[in-house]
Image: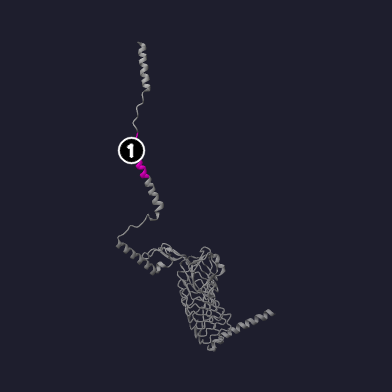
């Protein structure tokens, strides 16, 4: 019995062992697989589309929307009008390059060399804008004196920037040439003799940036520029300038000078400032502030075309020397200096020498308490008939040699009065020589 039960148990076990395992239910059916494949294909297409847009068609990704034909026509007309406006509007053309926007807005996107963008407009970004003139082809001329090359940032000649600034330049064509010069504003403190003897310079303009320079010396700035006809200061010059002497000396072609933007409040020396400006017919100098000036020697020396000078409003309280101030002004007929403060004036020798058209001079109101030298004061004034120097303190005058030499129309009594001073001084000199010999 037991054996039968055992066999039956073993049989069940063996059946279980050989019976196949039941198939499990699959995770995805066929329809799910198709959907996944389809999604993958769409994703691949989308990626390729993005790549195409970015790398293949990037130039056209901001294409304008097509307009109605009539709208297209109107738009073309507006563009043409804008271009015409740009050509006719100087404010937008000057200094702006091809990137300039429509001139209806008067705004420029960028500027040509030599200009900077300022509130939508191109303005000069240079200290000097000058015009030079060449007379022949293939001519080498001086632009600026050699000593100042180290202070120059850049030079632009006829809209072409030089690779390296140079004091001289070769011009293949004759005529006028526009030259822009920019300086290192932190280092340049003197313009002494900067354009001395540069005969090709005919016009020069100081732009707005010039006022920011810390210049202290302008002595002989344009001296001997014989063909210079125009000097312009767009804005007030630096207030730091102390020396203006010989600034326009021998500028023979300069017929007028606008002094409105001259800042001279710290000036000490204006001697020979306009000397030998033989084309200068008149000048308005009363606008100058010369409260600190001590030297006015030869201010108008040999200005042979100058006919009239009025200095009545100048403050000359510190001036010590006025010798040769009008000497050689052969066309001078009227001069007003009677109200000048001359408390510190020492030397007026040869002040009116060779003023051959001057007929009368009134110096009666001048304070002469410190004047010691009047040598040759009116020498060569052969038209002079009336001189009022009755208040001159003759006791303090030490040198009065030949003050009326060549003045044939002056009263002999006046000549004799000052001849006595001359003789007195000559006697003193002789006595001194005798004592030295002993």
Residue 75 spot, x, y in % from top left? 33, 63
Can residue 145 be spotted in the picture? yes
Quickly name the residue at label 1. Answer: 32
Which quadrant holds the C terminus? bottom right
Whether residue 264 is visible to the viewer of this picture, yes or no, is: no
Q: Which colouring convention does the figure follow?
A: one colour
* Front residue of this view, candidates 46 and 124: 46
Task: Pick whichever, 306 or 163, lies toward us.
Answer: 163
Residue 433 lies in magenta, yes or no?
no
Disc tally is 1
Left or right? Give the position of 437 relative to 205.
Answer: right
Q: Residue at x 69, y 80 (%)?
A: 437
Give the magenta range.
Answer: 27-43
- Return the x and y of residue 178 as percentages of the image width and height: 48, 70
Residue 31 on the magenta span? yes
- As displayed, is residue 83 above or below residue 59? below
Q: Quadrant of residue 144?
A: bottom right
Image position of 32 (left or right of 243): left
Q: In the depicted view, which residue is nearer to us: 209 or 8?
A: 8
> In the rendering, at what x and y percent does residue 407 appear?
54, 87
Q: Quadrant of residue 354?
A: bottom right
Residue 21 location (% of width, % of height): 36, 26
Residue at the far top in the pictured view: 1
């Amino acid at each position: 019995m037991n054996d039968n039960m055992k066999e039956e148990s073993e049989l069940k076990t063996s059946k279980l062992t050989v019976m196949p395992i039941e198939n499990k239910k699959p995770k995805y059916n066929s329809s799910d697989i198709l959907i996944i494949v389809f999604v993958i294909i769409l994703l691949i297409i989308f990626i390729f589309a993005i790549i195409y847009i970015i790398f293949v068609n990037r130039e056209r990704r901001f294409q304008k929307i097509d307009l109605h034909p009539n709208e297209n026509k109107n738009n073309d007309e507006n563009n043409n009008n804008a271009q015409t406006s740009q050509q006719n509007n100087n404010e937008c053309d000057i200094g702006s390059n091809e990137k300039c926007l429509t001139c209806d807005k008067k705004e420029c996107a960028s500027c040509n060399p030599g200009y900077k963008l300022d509130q939508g407009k191109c303005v000069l970004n240079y200290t000097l804008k000058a015009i030079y003139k060449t007379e022949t082809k293939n001519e080498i001329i001086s632009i600026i004196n050699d000593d100042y090359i180290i202070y120059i940032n850049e030079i632009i000649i006829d809209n072409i920037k030089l690779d390296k600034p140079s004091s001289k330049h070769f011009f293949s064509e004759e005529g006028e040439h526009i030259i822009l010069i920019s300086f290192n504003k932190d280092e340049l403190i003197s313009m002494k003799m900067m354009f001395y003897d540069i005969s090709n310079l005919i016009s020069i303009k100081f732009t707005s940036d010039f006022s920011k320079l810390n210049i202290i010396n302008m002595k002989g700035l344009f001296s001997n520029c014989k063909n210079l006809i125009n000097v312009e200061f767009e804005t007030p010059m630096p207030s730091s300038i102390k020396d203006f002497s010989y600034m326009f000396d021998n500028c023979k072609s300069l017929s007028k000078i606008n002094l409105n933007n001259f800042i001279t409040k710290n000036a000490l020396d204006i001697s020979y400032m306009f000397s030998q400006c033989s084309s200068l017919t008149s000048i308005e100098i009363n606008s100058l502030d010369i409260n600190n000036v001590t030297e006015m020697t030869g201010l108008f020396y040999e200005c042979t075309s100058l006919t009239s000078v009025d200095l009545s409003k100048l403050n000359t309280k510190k001036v010590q020397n006025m010798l040769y101030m009008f000497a050689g002004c052969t066309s001078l007929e009227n001069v007003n200096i009677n109200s000048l403060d001359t408390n510190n004036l020492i030397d007026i020798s040869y002040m009116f020498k060779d003023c051959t058209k001057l007929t009368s001079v009134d110096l009666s109101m001048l304070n002469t308490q410190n004047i010691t030298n009047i040598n040759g004061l009116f020498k060569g004034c052969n038209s002079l008939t009336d001189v009022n120097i009755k208040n001159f303190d003759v006791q303090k005058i030490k040198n009065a040699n030949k003050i009326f030499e060549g003045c044939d129309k002056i009263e002999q009594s006046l000549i004799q009065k000052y001849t006595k001073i001359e003789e007195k001084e000559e006697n003193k000199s002789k006595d001194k020589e005798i004592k030295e010999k002993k």
